[in-house]
Image (cartoon, helix red, strand yellow):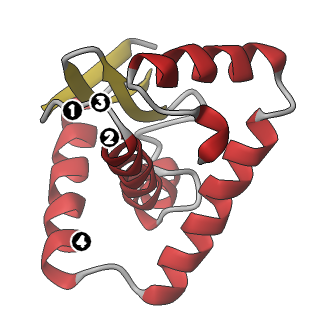
């Protein structure tokens, strides 16, 4: 099955605490938009457009930021269109509070769990050092 990678260029962040806040907010938006427990993920999975290889997230690199998705699919164009359509719906209708709270707990849990990984912790320490933010402050 063919693989696809889809990326969206986003606004660059200035270093510091605000950048980390915006990064965490963007990660939460990704979770709400296409995370494993999102409505869109379930729909795409049930339609056979994605499989368990599908995933993505938000990355901040010196001077730029991006939202990235990847996976295996015979129809990546349909996935792109579904992502864009769902993003429009969420912008227009908002996010139900119960969904937001559930996704927020999930995202925070993953961040805390990542502290158990030496590699992940070292990566975050270095990445946040470059943005002039103390990783353990989050």
Q: Identify the residue under disc 4.
A: 90
Q: Is residue 27 left or right of residue 87?
A: right
Q: Residue at coordinates 44% horizontally, 33% vertically from top-left?
A: 56
Check if mark 2's residue and mark 4's residue have beta carbons within 8 Å: no
Please tell me which of labels 3 and 4 falls first in the chain: 3
Residue at numbered disc 2: 19
The alpha-carbon separation of the residues under discs 3 and 4 comes to 28 Å
Residue 63 x/y as whole percent:
19, 17
Residues tagged 2 and 1 counted as in contact (Cβ below 8 A): yes
Label 1: which residue?
A: 14
Q: Kindly indicate whether the residue at mark 3 contacts the one at mark 1 (C-beta within 8 angstroms).
A: yes
Marks 4/1: CA distance?
26 Å
Q: Measured from the top left, where is residue 76 in percent x and y?
A: 27, 29
Give the structural element (helix, strand or loop) at label 1. loop
Image location of residue 16, percent across then percent down: 35, 36
Q: Which residue is mark 3?
A: 15
């Amino acid at each position: 099955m063919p693989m696809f990678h889809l990326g969206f260029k986003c606004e660059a962040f200035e270093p510091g605490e605000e950048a980390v806040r915006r990064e965490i907010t963007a990660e939460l938006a990704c979770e709400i938009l296409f995370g494993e427990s999102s409505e869109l993920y379930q729909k795409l999975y049930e339609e056979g457009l994605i499989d368990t290889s599908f995933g993505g997230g938000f990355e901040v690199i010196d001077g730029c930021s991006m939202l990235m998705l990847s996976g295996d699919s015979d129809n990546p164009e349909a996935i792109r269109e579904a992502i864009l359509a769902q993003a429009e719906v969420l912008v227009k209708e908002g996010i139900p509070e119960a969904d937001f709270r559930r996704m927020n707990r999930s995202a925070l849990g993953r961040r805390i769990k990542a502290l158990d990984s030496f590699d992940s912790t070292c990566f975050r320490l270095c990445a946040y050092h470059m943005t002039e933010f103390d990783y353990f402050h989050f």
